[in-house]
Image (spheres, grey):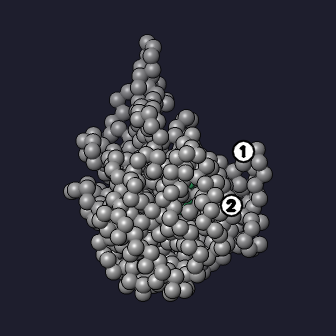
């Protein structure tokens, strides 16, 4: 994890340099890192893609993305020009052309001679998933993977489509690069607030002693989005909410909440503790899927005063699609700490708000000593970890209402990132790119993590894959998912907590 440090000399080779990820995320993040003085003079980007473009066209195209997506208020023409000097070249090449990779190797060797020291070589696969194998193998054949100390491969999700394909992908990747050279991105792990879960839990003595089944009633993780599938219908049709969000982002957040204390801040120590959680998740028996998992798909509706079309009318989506745009799960972590504490997870598109939040619901006090009239408003303690937006943490506890009588009501104690640190948090991709260049793998997914996460969701995917949903679409754009999601939690006598710091935390 980046700590006010500079990257070592590095060359970043981006495959898919003309694509959306480079335009929207990678270049704006690099520009912000540059502005913060994190990249140093010995830093270069080589863009590779098959799209025909001159170098000037490439730079102009990237500048457009950076003006739109760099951190607010940071665009500056002169600083851009200084940054653009590091954009060495745009190489137009077919990824199946071995000659292009030999030329690339020649180009990189030439750079070695120019700088003091041997720069780190980062090969970033910002390509369609179908090209990952081809580019990786070409890199291997051109001799670009062999230098295990400085060659690094960055792979974006999806890491496979299911457990079997994830295993095959890992076997292919590790056949060319060593595991420690491979950086699998789950951008949620780059978010400051997600990283802060570790700090909150293990840098404070206060919560850890009560962070278990004796004091915690249940945990809720909500990641909701207002957007639909946007221009990604083609991809999403084959993914769905469980693959797109739960298998990676939500399970990673769950791991950070549920993991055992770390012994050291070592990448493998942290990742191993997370894998332990994934392996402890109670396997969902196929017969239990209807009770423990809910899927939904949005119909048309209204969101923030705008009409939203149904998922089945989005571009690239089949008119009778069975793909879920909403998923909710109830999971258990079978170990001493968490036995029988439910973890409720939900995520979906076209929900009323864009918010990612974790609720830790504590148990009621063991004995209620106050008179009935005092506790009409009484609620058990609640800890809300707000990942985005309005990043922060809120602890809800009981206080005495001012006045002659004993009357208790819940009040909130708030920590707000912006107010506390008076600085904008870096974007996830800034953190992740800097970490790759510095060789810190803490925030990246190891092969065993990816496979363990697939194992958790496989029974649900299998059952859903075998039986087309009869009721799709089953929620309106702008609703909190299908009614079955309410039933999932209500049948345990609980309710989803409203993902908002400003309301009373009840009943979404
Ligand atoms: C991506 C998913 O991994 O995460 C998208 O593929 C989703 O479908 C996105 O919209 C959400 O990320 P964030 O950072 O906006 O919460």
Residue positioned 55% across, 45% down in the render: 78
Cβ of disc 1 within 8 Å of ligand 1?
no
Q: Nearer the viewer, residue 367 or 448?
A: 448
Residue 31: x, y in percent?
Answer: 50, 52
Residue positioned 32% across, 68% down in the render: 118
**In which quadrant of the rendered view does residue 398 lie?**
top left
In the displayed structure, does residue 309 sit left or right of residue 121? right
Q: Is residue 457 visible?
A: no
Q: Nearer the viewer, residue 92 or 430?
A: 92
| Image quarter for ligand 1 | bottom right
Q: Name the residue at the top extreme.
A: 404
Q: Which residue is mark 2?
A: 230
Q: CA distance from mark 2 to mark 1?
A: 16 Å
Residue positioned 34% across, 47% down in the render: 4
Residue 192: x, y in percent?
Answer: 42, 48
Residue positioned 58% across, 52% down in the render: 66
**In which quadrant of the rendered view does residue 94 lie?**
bottom right
Q: Which residue is mark 1?
A: 304
Cβ of disc 2 within 8 Å of ligand 1?
yes
In the displayed structure, does residue 234 sit left or right of residue 93? right
Q: Is residue 46 visible?
A: yes
In the displayed structure, does residue 180 sit left or right of residue 501? left
């Amino acid at each position: 994890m980046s700590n006010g440090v500079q990257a070592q000399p590095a060359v970043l080779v981006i495959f898919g340099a003309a694509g959306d990820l480079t335009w929207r995320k990678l270049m704006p993040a690099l520009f912000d890192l540059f502005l913060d003085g994190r990249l140093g003079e010995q830093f270069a980007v080589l863009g590779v893609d098959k799209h025909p473009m001159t170098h000037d066209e490439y730079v102009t195209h990237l500048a457009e993305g950076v003006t739109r997506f760099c951190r607010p208020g940071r665009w500056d023409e002169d600083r851009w020009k200084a940054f653009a000097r590091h954009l060495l070249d745009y190489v137009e090449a077919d990824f199946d052309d071995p000659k292009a990779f030999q030329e690339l190797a020649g180009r990189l060797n030439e750079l070695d001679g120019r700088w003091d020291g041997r720069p780190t070589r980062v090969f970033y696969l910002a390509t369609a998933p179908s090209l990952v194998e081809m580019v990786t193998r070409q890199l291997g054949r051109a001799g670009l993977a062999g230098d295990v100390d400085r060659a690094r491969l960055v792979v974006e999700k999806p890491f496979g489509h299911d457990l079997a394909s994830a295993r095959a992908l890992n076997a292919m990747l590790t056949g060319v690069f060593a595991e420690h050279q491979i950086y699998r991105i789950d951008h949620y792990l780059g978010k400051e607030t997600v990283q802060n879960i570790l700090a909150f839990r293990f840098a404070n003595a206060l919560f850890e002693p009560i962070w278990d089944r004796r004091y915690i009633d249940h945990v809720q993780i909500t990641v909701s989005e207002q957007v639909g599938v946007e221009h990604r219908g083609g991809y999403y049709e084959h993914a769905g909410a469980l693959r797109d969000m739960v298998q990676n982002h939500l399970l990673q957040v769950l791991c950070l909440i549920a993991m055992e204390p770390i012994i050291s801040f070592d990448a493998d120590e942290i990742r191993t503790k997370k894998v332990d959680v994934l392996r402890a998740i109670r396997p969902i028996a196929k017969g239990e899927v209807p009770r423990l998992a809910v899927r939904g798909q949005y119909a048309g509706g209204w969101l923030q005063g705008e009409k939203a079309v149904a998922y089945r009318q989005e571009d690239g989506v089949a008119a009778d699609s069975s793909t879920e745009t909403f998923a909710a799960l109830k999971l258990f972590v079978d170990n001493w700490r968490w036995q029988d504490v439910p973890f409720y997870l939900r995520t979906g598109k076209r929900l009323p708000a864009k918010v990612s939040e974790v609720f830790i619901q504590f148990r009621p006090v063991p004995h209620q000593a106050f008179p009935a009239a005092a506790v009409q408003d009484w609620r058990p303690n609640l800890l809300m970890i707000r990942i985005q937006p309005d990043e922060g943490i809120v602890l809800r506890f009981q206080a005495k209402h001012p006045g002659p009588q004993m009357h208790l009501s819940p009040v909130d104690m708030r920590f707000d990132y912006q107010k506390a640190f008076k600085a904008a948090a870096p974007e996830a991709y800034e953190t992740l790119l800097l970490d790759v260049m510095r060789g810190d793998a803490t925030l990246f997914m190891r092969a065993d993590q990816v496979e363990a996460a697939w194992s958790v969701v496989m029974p649900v995917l299998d059952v859903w894959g075998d039986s087309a949903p009869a009721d799709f679409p089953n929620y309106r754009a702008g609703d909190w998912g299908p009614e079955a999601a309410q039933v999932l939690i209500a049948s345990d006598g609980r309710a989803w907590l409203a993902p908002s710091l400003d309301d009373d935390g009840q009943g979404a």
